[in-house]
Image (tube, rainbow, N blue to C red):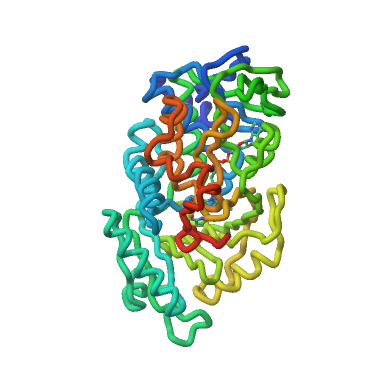
Amino acid sequence: MQRYSGFGLAKHALSHHENWERQWRNPTPKKQYDVIIVGGGGHGLATAYYLAKEHGITNVAVVEKGWLGGGNTARNTTIVRSNYLWDESAALYEHAMKLWEGLSQDLNYNVMFSQRGVMNLGHTLQDMRDIQRRVNANRLNGIDGEVLTPAQIQEIVPIMDCSKNARYPILGASWQPRAGVARHDAVAWGYARAADALGVDLLQNTEVTGFKIRDGRVYGVHTNRGDIEAKTVGCVAAGNSGVLAGMAGFRLPLESHPLQALVSEPLKPILDTVVMSNHVHGYISQTDKGDLVIGAGIDGYNGYGQRGSYPTVEHTLQAIVEMFPIFSRVRMNRQWGGIVDTCPDACPILSATPVKGLFFNCGWGTGGFKATPGSGHVFAWTLAKNQAHPLAAPFSIDRFHTGALVDEHGAAGVAH
Ligand code: FAD
Ligand code: PYC
């Protein structure tokens, strides 16, 4: 480690971060890899990392059209929880939760995973019946969960208006104490650095423009930097998955929608948990820096613009201010959108496709950040063994033919 005198330290501080070690290489694409991952978001990078770490497959390229983590990974509101209703999804998200609990140590990178608890509010009797059913199901699956009364909610979040006169009276909530938030960029960077260290090539500014397919089998991709060959290709491209499927000659049951979020000016610490309300389409938490992070439901139209429409955020902010009158004069600093890939049953697709060797991991919609480690872990297994991981099997595209859908609309964080 370099040591600095007082003068040296000041000089270093003013040196515009010169001589900082690069976190990963910037390699020239090779002609051929064992596996190509399309999409350098959290899920793609995690897949590459686990391929190398757990299956010894290191001749891997992650092909990313922009920069690592620049898609939904760096645009989400970082809520991590595993309180899904059905056994299949609860198992997948809980697998991710367990990986989150050791992730900073595993990657030797602080992903700032903070288990500060997540609350899902109920505003109607039917909301409360759904909450009770989901919490019971969670507990049967060994997932932590409680049903809170308004008095318990008020104790945890004293600044929320829990009075009976509120516009959206709060009748109770589900509460998962092990849930929380993580730093999204750090998740992408941590996986990227660890995958690179194991030999994975991270190819940024490299856009996949088509697939090399012969006799119903994939053998590579066309990119803006030339063709790259591989007998196994995994697409992990979130909102652009439908576009990639189209390039490979089939359709996926996905719709791409804008989903937006906002952050406020920084405030002193005032909210130390995460509050979500599916009913009013709004949720809120506070970052360690002090910003309030607020998110909305999806914009109802299909679109590929990474921004949303004003009425959606206006509706969300009205609801947030009704629940938290204390925030009525807080100024918003930034607003943005991502492109979320929503499936009819609000569950992901982790699947082989009609093209041999070509797999898709997508459809995480508004809720895939929390799944990042689990998704990467089971997708790597699936690619390495050319066989669905048991946790991935229920999420095959076959379910849209057999009708074995896993309906998670009630547990998906925001309506879609
Ligand atoms: P991405 O991070 O989008 O990565 C896909 C990558 O593929 C992109 O970098 C893209 O550039 C690349 N790509 C696309 N096409 C090509 C191509 N042709 N060639 C090469 N590369 C290509 N989830 C939660 O669990 N909790 C939340 O609180 C939460 N909040 C959200 C809030 C917002 C505003 C948004 C937009 C999403 C939110 N989500 C949340 C959802 C979550 O962000 C996503 O499900 C998750 O990040 C998806 O990760 P990914 O790695 O699959 O996708
Ligand atoms: O899936 O928990 C979630 C979520 C919260 C906000 C957006 N998605």
| Residue at 54% across, 23% down | 232
x%, y% of residue 342? 59, 51
| Residue at 40% across, 44% down | 112
| Residue at 50% across, 43% down | 184
Q: Nearer the viewer, residue 124 or 369?
A: 124
x%, y% of residue 309? 71, 60
| Residue at 45% across, 26% down | 386
- Number of numbered callouts drawn: 0
The answer to whether 45 appears left or right of 109 in the picture is right
Is residue 142 visible in the rendered structure shown here?
yes
Q: Nearer the viewer, residue 365 or 286?
A: 365
Note whether 123 is above or below 394 in the view shown. below
The answer to whether 39 appears left or right of 409 in the picture is right
Ligand 1 shows up in which quadrant of the image? top right
- Assign the C terminus to one quadrant of the image: bottom right
Is residue 17 visible in the rendered structure shown here?
no
x%, y% of residue 326? 50, 74
Q: Which residue, as the protein is rendered here, is positioned at the far bottom?
A: 165
Q: Which residue, as the protein is rendered here, is positioned at the far top?
A: 31
Note whether 323 is above or below 118 in the view shown. below
x%, y% of residue 304? 71, 47
Q: Which residue, as the protein is rendered here, is positioned at the far front?
A: 402
